[in-house]
Amino acid sequence: MAAPLSASTFLKALRDEGATVQEHAGWTTHNRNRQGPWGPMHGVMIHHTVTRGTAATVGIVQRGYSGLPGPLCHGMIAKDGTVHLVGYGRANHAGLGDDDVLRAVIAEAKPPTDNEANTDGNRHFYGFECENMGDGKDPWPAEQIEAIVRVGAAICRAHGWGARSLLRHLDWQPGKIDPRGLDWDDVLARVAKRLGSKPPANPLPPAKRPIVDLSRLVAAARSNPAASGQPVTYAGVRTVEAALVDEGLLSKTYSDGHFGTTTITAYAAWQRRLGYRGNDADGIPGRTSLERLGDRHGFTVTS
């Protein structure tokens, strides 16, 4: 637990660790603080952008997009290893995640599998987006990986944290797969080495895509449970709701595991985004629309 570093201390920490930093106009005051608290801080989260081109990517993470205003991170790590600072304060990067994972990060322990979206990560994590398509084919250049290591070590050193204070978006939020293709065990070991400590024990297993059963999801949607006083009918609802939140179609307030009227409205908006109209955009998931959502947000659909 720690108060956020001041912007000047944050910048100095990055440069003292040897990171190449480019400051963008207004970054020190560009934030979402009016939407909620920022801090106490518990860790550093790494993402991939699903974009190509450094200039375009910087613009996206600065400004955000419809339904998800920027900044979308504090820094964007480009292919050449340059760390582009675009915001400081609360940023729209982590979303809702698993409170068990947060407790593990605080304890600097191996995070458990994330299966809930019940805790505000934007409040507690520094966030760095990394320029990568996230398709498992786009390479991670050595310069970019070294920058990730230096950024992680810099913030951990400034707070007196260990390497386990770094985590991936996929560790935090159900349905996420980023940063896909990055050797995370190697990153953690290199951060630990820079900090003068041993590599973290219990290396993380390979990431597994969550599975959403279409028939169980449809049953949950048709039963339309109220959130208050009702059990979660199917855990896969959380995965789908997390994806809808990330698409900007569902408020994080309603990412609660209940496929109620608000989630149906959000899913109908997703169907319309895919071109469906009328009864085909009724908010009840179909295979094609659900598979398209899964392709974008890293989950597999079964019958």
Image (spheres, rainbow, N blue to C red):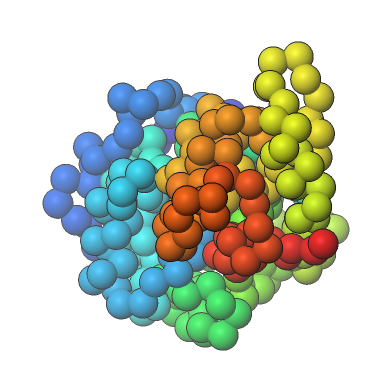
Instruction: Name the quadrant containing residue 301.
Output: bottom right
Q: Is residue 39 above or below residue 228?
A: below
User: Taking the image as drawn, is residue 109 in sight?
Assistant: no
Task: Check the picture and name the quadrant holding the N terminus.
Answer: top right
Q: Is residue 250 left or right of residue 55?
A: right
Q: Is residue 230 above or below residue 217?
A: above
User: Taking the image as drawn, is residue 224 in sight?
Assistant: yes
* Residue pictured at 62% horizontal, 66% vertical: 288
Q: In the displayed image of the protein, which residue is found farthest to the right?
A: 202
* Residue closest to the eye, 240 or 26: 240
* Residue closest to the eye, 151 or 220: 220
**Residue 211 spot, x, y in % from top left:** 78, 59
* Residue pictured at 81% horizontal, 24% vertical: 231
**Residue 99 spot, x, y in % from top left:** 70, 33
**Residue 73 spot, x, y in % from top left:** 39, 50
Q: Is residue 135 left or right of residue 202?
A: left
Instruction: Name the quadrant containing residue 37.
Output: top left
Task: Check the picture and name the quadrant holding the C terminus.
Answer: bottom right
Q: Is residue 145 above or below residue 4?
A: below
Q: In the displayed image of the protein, which residue is found farthest to the left?
A: 25
**Residue 146 spot, x, y in % from top left:** 49, 73
Q: Is residue 247 above or below residue 179?
A: above
* Residue closest to the eye, 281 or 269: 281
Q: Is residue 181 left or right of residue 70?
A: right
Q: In the displayed image of the protein, which residue is found farthest to the top?
A: 229
